[in-house]
Amino acid sequence: MAAKPASDYTANQAYLPDFCAASTVFIVVLIAELVAILLTLAAYDTAGMFMIELAKTSLFVLWLGILSAAVMCLFRSRLESAGKTLAFVVSFIVLEIVCLALAEIAYQITRIFGESVIIDDSHAGFIGRTFAISSIIIALAMRYLYVSSEWRRSIVLEAQARISALQALIRPHFLFNSMNTIASLTRSNPRQAEEAVEDLSDLLRANLGGSGDRTTIKEELEVAAIYQRIEKLRLGERLHVRWDIAELPMRALIPSLVIQPLLENAIYHGIELLPDGGEVRVAGERDGEFLAITISNPIAAGRQRSTTGNNMAMANIQQRFDLAYDHRASVVVSDNDDSFSVRLRFPHEERA
């Protein structure tokens, strides 16, 4: 079964990390151990005592880190829905309560089993020292998460601006050619001219009026098919598009306006420059829990157009995939002497 998707990155930005993920737990454990080393270095300078105190401090701090990660994993979704400021405040309070509760339990265990677990401090001193140190560390962590959240928000806003630019970026030559083709068809084939006007209207609506960051593969392929029909009227038998997409689940999500611009690049930079035209191949496949779509086309040796726009499109798509899938997706470009291809690989996700 397909995994449920993460929320679209414009809807509700995640500003707390996924504490349930193994990578996050590893970072928490690593930071906890570094804190234990730092605390032990500050208190002891004798080699023998250092290792003993490091073992005791590490045991206590690691328990704090792992338990705090477990609590945040449990309450993260509720904290996210409360809003950024409130989430940070509540997270701080919850983590402090966890630290103080564990400190009290550790001290009581030491009091009961004094021969095996030793805390060389008074009750009030140990609790107070734990509170002070944990407050500083938690405050620094909250500050880091806030800065990270703001950085990610700026990246998302930039991506949204890029999407808006991409939606408005319909090459003038395509519009001029399409209108000229429609004008000629009004005399020779009025019915086909009417269909071409409807296709052009649908394409403009999809490009200029996109309502979401991600859409289904079915909707994305429909937009690309509309673009193909319009270009087919102009290029005729010089343009062939082979769709090998039977393996793709049509309900799977993909960032919007991805396939159509890549198909446009394949025609503009490849097929148009070949005297006899050629074939663009759009192939889709499953790769475990991932999906892959490859758009490939032949190119004319020595007749390539400027690649500035193409490179910008690739960078745009890569950034949007990184944001949508948190670096779990890839955009791989293969540029050979006689062919050009782009392979999109991304997790299989569907709307709940």
Image (cartoon, rainbow, N blue to C red):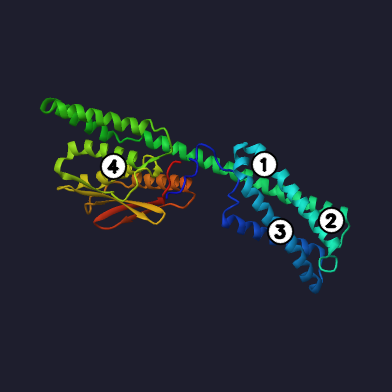
* Residue designated by label 4: 264
Of 86 and 43, nearer the camera is 86
**Real-space Cα distance between discs 2 and 1?**
26 Å
Q: Are marks 1 and 3 in contact (CB under 8 Å)?
A: no
Q: Position of residue 163 (x, y in %)?
A: 42, 38
* Residue designated by label 3: 63
Q: Are there few (<14), some (14-19), or many (20+) residues within 10 Å of tag 4?
A: some
Q: Are there few (<14), some (14-19), or many (20+) residues within 10 Å of tag 1?
A: many
Tell which circle, 1 or 4, labels the residue nearer the N-terminal end.
1
Left or right: 24, with 241 as reference point: right
Amino acid type shown at disc 4: Glu
Write the residue at 35% across / 34% down. Answer: 207
Q: Position of residue 345 (x, y in %)?
A: 39, 52
**Real-space Cα distance between discs 4 and 3?**
56 Å
Tell me the mark number nearer the camera, choosing from 1 and 3. Answer: 3
* Residue designated by label 2: 126
Q: Secondary structure at mark 1?
A: helix
**Real-space Cα distance between discs 1 and 3?**
22 Å
Query: In this picture, is 52 found above or below 247?
Result: below
* Residue designated by label 1: 88
